[in-house]
Amino acid sequence: MVVIGGGPVGLAAAAHLLERGLEPVVLEAAPLVGAAPRDWGHVYMFSPWRYNIDKAARALLEQHGWTAPDLEAFPTGRDLAEGYLEPLARLPELAPRLWLGARVTGVARAGAGKVRDAGRERQPFEVRFADPEGKQGRLLVRAVIVATGTWGNPSPAGSSGLPALGEREAADRIRYGMPDVLGAECRRFGRRRTLVVGSGHSAVGTLIDLADLARHVPGTTVLWAARSADLTRAYGGGAADQLPERGVLGQRLRHLVETGEVELLAPFAVDEIRRRDGGSLTVLSAEGRAVEVDEMVVATGLRPDLGILREVRTDLDPALECPRVLAPLIDPNLHSCGTVRPHGAEELAQPEPGLFLAGMASYGRAPTFLLATGYEQVRSIAAFLAGDVEAARRVELDLPQTGVCSSSRVLPGTAEAEFSCCTPATPQGSCCAPKPKLAEDAPCCGSGARRDIAQVEPAE
């Protein structure tokens, strides 16, 4: 059987399949495991290690002498990739089954097109893939677990879900996701006027980092475009959140808005982006407002790219693009991360017997995903594929209640952390190389409290 994706949930799926005596092959498009957490490697997660290590994977690692990190500590994306996923990928049980640089291009029933009914369930899945040189290959397997994540497919700035008019033409001034504004990318945003679009955790963390940068680099201005004037979800559950490192994000952002360190534009639904002479941008809203900026950070969410499943039969919710049965359990209009009921093979199965979505890919456009949920998903799927239906239906997950994703709580802000320069803070080296201490050479990166500044739960 094939697992598509070598992130945390994909490797956990392989560990659970091995534990059940099954033979997985993991196809990962990137040259290294954990491509997504490496991309946000500077960011601390808002859940501690104990929620981010899969039980079967940990058991496998410990058989080879691996020692788990402090389970109450908060890993960065880089920590997750280098301290957990890399050692897991190197294990002799997994390494021969992990095919790096293998980009899946399609999944189908061998010899049976999507329309054909007769006998299709008896046909193996044909999984096509290409290596880095473009050479094609295929595997014939009885089951496929799609754990591709959503990190590489960000939503656009446009409020309608389509790119704003002019968004593609302004691509060189737009950064999607969570830039390392206090580290590797500080020179891009220092002394610039930056508009952050979005109200989720990635946007909140980026706004807090930019405000820290602005406090120490004169000429840096931070603007926040929120589609709704109701900022309840952005400000979150605060001290009531059982993931306290995440709850503090909303408190900090509220304080920054109230003190004017972040200029709030709400409601502001991005409609058009125009280039100006000199390269700056004029961003226009559907409400008729306009603002001029040098850079944009678009953090409006993620969406799945399930094009590889075009030739198999899927049953997806029309709004969330997740398995239809799962949709009411994870709908962000109703649920926070901690109120999502544990679920597994039964909810994730597709009309093609043996085909499952797992991890962030299974959540579609819903942002209510936690890694611990993904680990429970693949535990259940592995049990089902091994014929242990009772174990597949059993719940083996305890999540913390959290009000950040969906909450009416409003809490006061907190004091900002002391700034410090960060010579060794990033693997690329520091943007604060030693220079004469002139006024214009104020430090532009690093913080003594990064854990409190920018935190996010990974989208694989």
Image (tube, helix red, strand yellow):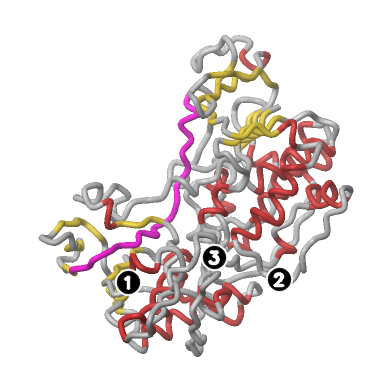
Q: CA distance from mark 3 to mark 1?
A: 20 Å
- Residue at the spot of label 2: 73
- Residue at the spot of label 3: 43
Q: Is residue 44 above or below residue 357?
A: below
The kind of secondary structure element at disc 1 is strand
Q: Residue at x 39, y 58 (%)?
A: 300
Q: Residue at x 65, y 14 (%)?
A: 123
Q: Which-is-in-front pick, marks 1 and 2? A: 2
Q: Toward the viewer: 150 or 58?
A: 58
Q: Is residue 165 above or below residue 143?
A: below
The kind of secondary structure element at disc 3 is loop
Assign the N terminus to one quadrant of the image: top right
Q: In the picture provided, is 97 more to the left or to the right than 357?
A: right
- Residue at the spot of label 1: 224
Mark identifier at residue 194: none
Q: CA distance from mark 2 to mark 3?
A: 14 Å
Image quarter of residue 11 = top right
* Amino acid at dot 1: Trp
